[in-house]
Amino acid sequence: MNLPSRLPKRLYPFFWDIDAKNFSPAKKPYFAIQRLLDRGDTEAVRWVRRNFPESLIKETFEVIRDFNASTGNFWANFLKIPKDKVLCLQEPYLSMRRSHWPY
């Protein structure tokens, strides 16, 4: 599967902190997947599922810890990823997040 080289314009708002017009999801797939699954809407999730292989989506949860714990838990269940492999669900990271935002 060829990874997308550009984002659709409708997804630009989810990349407020970078130049979305020149961003290549093929060059930084973990970042694109994380941002869209964690902060995107239904259309963003559909776009990720259509444009990235499931194996790469699963791998993203195993190497990127900056997912919301609720998002990580949902996708671990949905994609059948063992929760001990999902970085954002590991205790050292959860404890650190709680110390900054205890809610």
Image: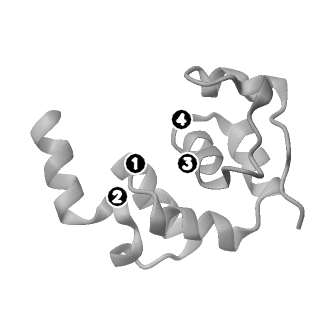
Q: What amino acid type should be assigned to the residue bearing mark 1? A: Asp
Quarter of the rendering occupied by the C terminus: top left
The x, y position of residue 53, in whole percent, is 76, 67
Cα distance in 3D space between marks 4 and 2: 15 Å
Residue 102 visible in the snapshot = no
- Closer to the N terminus: mark 1 or mark 2? 1
The answer to whether the residue labelled 1 contacts the one labelled 2, judged by CB atoms less than 8 Å apart, is yes
Q: What amino acid type should be assigned to the residue bearing mark 4? A: Arg
- Closer to the N terminus: mark 4 or mark 2? 4
Q: What amino acid type should be assigned to the residue bearing mark 2? A: Cys
- Closer to the N terminus: mark 3 or mark 4? 3
Residue 59 visible in the snapshot = yes
The x, y position of residue 86, in whole percent, is 40, 68
The answer to whether the residue labelled 1 contacts the one labelled 4, judged by CB atoms less than 8 Å apart, is no
Position of residue 19 relative to residue 77, above or below, is: above
Q: Which residue is mark 2?
A: 88
The answer to whether the residue labelled 3 contacts the one labelled 1, judged by CB atoms less than 8 Å apart, is yes
Q: At numbered mark 2, what does the secondary structure look like: helix, strand or loop?
A: helix
Position of residue 62 relative to residue 46, above or below, is: below
Q: Nearer the viewer, residue 75 or 51?
A: 51
How many residues crowd mark 1 within 10 Å: few (<14), some (14–19), many (20+)? some
Q: Say which residue appears at 42% left-offset and 49% top-offset.
A: 67
Q: Nearer the viewer, residue 27 or 86?
A: 27
